[in-house]
Amino acid sequence: MNSKFLLFITLFLISNFSFGYENEFALKAGASVAYSHLKYIDHSEDNAGGVGFNTNFGYRFSRFEFNLTSFTAFGEMEKLTYQIGGTRVDGEGSFNHASFGPTLRYYFDVRPNGKWHWYVAVGPIWSINTFKLEDFTVQSGTYRKQYRYSYNSRGWMFTIGLEEAFANKILNPAYIELLVAYQTAYQVSLLDNSDFKQVLTLESDKVRTNIYSTTVMINFGLIVF
């Protein structure tokens, strides 16, 4: 017990005089609060909000860090117009969102109160978005309650945040960050979820820039290992 306490005190004191751990792999994970603004093909717009999770796994050098970044969000969205092939529907309901991509992070030698340091990160992003419409009006084609509307998108994300400047990961440094992502859709699909064991793709179209989304997330968490 005494040896663990002395180790903790030693690492804590060292952390006040070092830039932070380096030349190591690290996994960071935590919770997220998300807000998205969507604009669709007919210029209809919607705001969606939700909560989720975020992870970063990568290698930390002295100032730079390369990560594989991912985050998910679940929430509610209001009325939008969706179209794929001959099916066109107005609706509102819930959504699932999952994104991933590589990011390059840079740590500044600026420490508020001497315990945190600033960082920025940037990288490309790919996303899968699925909507379950619970209240909808069919304008053309066929749409049923068990159907799902899905689209894949890509774009860029930018992050600015703060991380505790501990010298060792064993102290589980905390972080908090603001992430902004802008994406455009490149494929839309109409799915049949009648049998949850086997989701069928009823129709799929390649699209170009007819769905735009801007996502703002507040992420926070700890370095797990």
Image (spheres, rainbow, N blue to C red):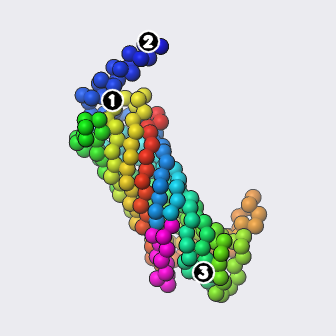
**Which element is circle 2 on?**
helix
Q: Which residue is mark 2?
A: 2
Task: State which region is magenta.
Answer: 37-48
Q: CA distance from mark 1 to mark 2?
A: 21 Å
**Is residue 39 highlighted in magenta?**
yes
The amino acid type, in three-letter code, at marker 3 is Asp
Q: Position of residue 113 (x, y in %)?
A: 25, 37
Residue 194 x, y percent position in the rendering: 76, 67
Secondary-structure class at tag 3: strand
Asked if the stretch drawn in magenta spans residue 76, the answer is: no
Residue 221 visible within the image: yes
Q: Which residue is mark 3?
A: 90
Mark 3 Cα-neighbour bin, 10 Å: few <14, some 14–19, many ≥20? some
Residue type at tag 2: Asn
Q: Amino acid at mark 1?
A: Ala
* Dots 1, 2 in contact, CB < 8 A: no
Instruction: Find disc 1 in the rendering and name its residue.
Output: 167
